Amino acid sequence: MMEKIKQLLKHPMTLIFGLLIVGIFIWDNLYPIREFSDMENRALTKKPAFSVKSLMAEGDQSYTMKYEKYVNDQFVLRDQWISLKSRSEFLLGKTENNGVIYGKDHYMFEKYFSTDEERLGKNTAFVKEFGDKYADQTTVSAMLIPYSYEALEDKVPAGLAFVDQVARTKEIYGELEKSGIKTLDIFPTMSEHRDEYIYYRTDHHWTTQGAYYAYRQFCESRGRKPVELSQLTGHEVKDFYGTFFSKSKAFNTVPDVISYYDFSTGKIVIDGKETEGLYAMEKFDERDKYGAFLHGNNGLTVLRSGEVDRPGDGSRILVVKDSFGNCFTPFLLRNYDEVWVVDLRYLKEEMSAIMSENHFDDVLILYGFVSFDSYPSVSKITY
C-alpha cells in the first residue's frame, strides 16, 4: 500500500488531477438540482427516467442524449462557468456568441443571415388566404416589424450579411395587397426615431416607445386619433435582461428599462378566464419582465376599454400577433371599445369561428419579421 502511495507521490500532477475529478464528481452529485436558471431564463433539464425503451431510442429521445443534457444543465456552478466563458471570449475579442452579435453602445443583435424561404412563402400564402376571405367584410391591415439591426445600422458591426428585411417585407406586402390587405411599412418610422430608445439592447423586442410610434402610424392609417404619451401616466421597471442576454451571457451587459402605461379597462378575459389588469405586475419582479405585458402570450385575450376617451360606439379590433404585439395592444384601448388579441401559437378556437361570430371594424396582423419567417402556427389563421 505504502509503495503505491509513494508511486503516486512521484507524479503529483496526476494525483491532483485525479483528486480534482473525484472532488468535482462528489460535489456535482451533492449539488442541489435546479429547476430554473435565472441567468438563462429557461427551465433546466431534469434527470430522465431510465427504461430499456429509452435506452434503445435514437436521437433526442434516447436516454443517453437526455442524460447528457441533464448533466450539462445541472453541472455544479454552471452560471459561474458561463460567466467565465463570456469573460474569456471578450478578452479574445470575439464579437458574437451563441447566435448573438455584439454591437456598439452595448446593443446586441440577432445573427439573422438567411430566411426559411419555404416557411416565408407558406406564411405569406396563409395571410393572403385570410385576406381573400375577409378583406371585403372588414379592413385587414398587416404590419411586419423589422428586427433592430435594420433601423439601428449605425450600431451594427460592419460587413455582416444580414437579411434585408426592408426588401423582403416589400416583396411580401406586394403579395398581400393582391388579396385586399392594407400594408404598413413602419421601417421609415423606426429609422426616423433610431436615435431614441426604440429597441432593447438585450432583447429582440421593440421597446414600448418603439411600439408607440408604430401605433401612431396604424391609427393615422385608419383615420383614428392616436393618444399622446403626455396624456398617459407612465412607469419604468429597471434591470431587464432579455433574450439576447439569455443566449450570450455577456458579462458586461447593460440592463434595459421597460416602460408601461396606465389604461382603464373594463372586463378582461384571457382564454375564457376573467383576469385583473392589463399587466401581470408580479412579472416585473422576475427575470422575464417582458412577460408582464398582457400577462404573456395567450391564445385569445378580450380587452374591454374603460377609458373615458374611448369611442363609445361599440368599435372592435382584432389583433393577430406574436409577442411584439404585447406592448403595442394597450394603446388601442383609447381607439376601440373592445380589443381582441389572438396569438395563433396558443389559440384553441378556430379563426373562422371568431370571425363569423363577431364583427370587427379592423383586423391587424402584426408580427416581427423573424417570427413571420419561422412560425408554422401562422397556418392557423386559415382554420
Image (cartoon, helix red, strand yellow):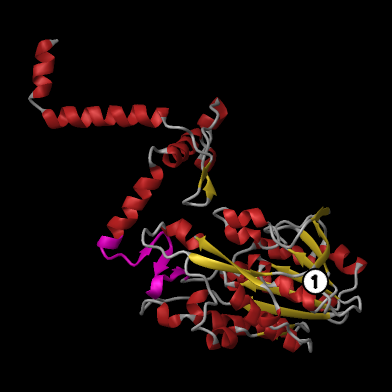
- In which quadrant will I find the N terminus? top left
Dividing the picture into quadrants, the one containing residue 337 is bottom right
Above or below residue 154? Residue 15 is: above
Q: Residue at x 90, y 78 (%)?
A: 312
The residue where tag 1 is placed is 318
Q: Residue at x 63, y 63 (%)?
A: 375
Dividing the picture into quadrants, the one containing residue 347 is bottom right
Residue 199 in sight here: yes
The image shows residue 53 at horizontal and vertical percentages of 57, 29
Please state if 79 lies on the left or on the right of 124 as rendered. Answer: left
> 208 or 356: nearer the eye?
208
Please state if 177 lies on the left or on the right of 187 as rendered. Answer: right
Q: Residue at x 61, y 85 (%)?
A: 170
Above or below residue 173? Residue 270 is: above
Above or below residue 146? Residue 287 is: above
Amino acid carrying mark 1 in the image:
Leu
Of all residues, the one furthest to the top in this rendering is 1
Residue 242 in sight here: no
> 53 or 12: nearer the eye?
12
Specify the segment rendered in magenta: 90-112
Q: How many numbered discs?
A: 1
The image shows residue 270 at horizontal and vertical percentages of 79, 57
The image shows residue 30 at horizontal and vertical percentages of 41, 27
The image shows residue 59 at horizontal and vertical percentages of 50, 42
- In which quadrant will I find the C terminus? bottom right
Classify mark 1: helix, strand or loop: strand
Residue 241 within the magenta-colored segment of the rendering: no
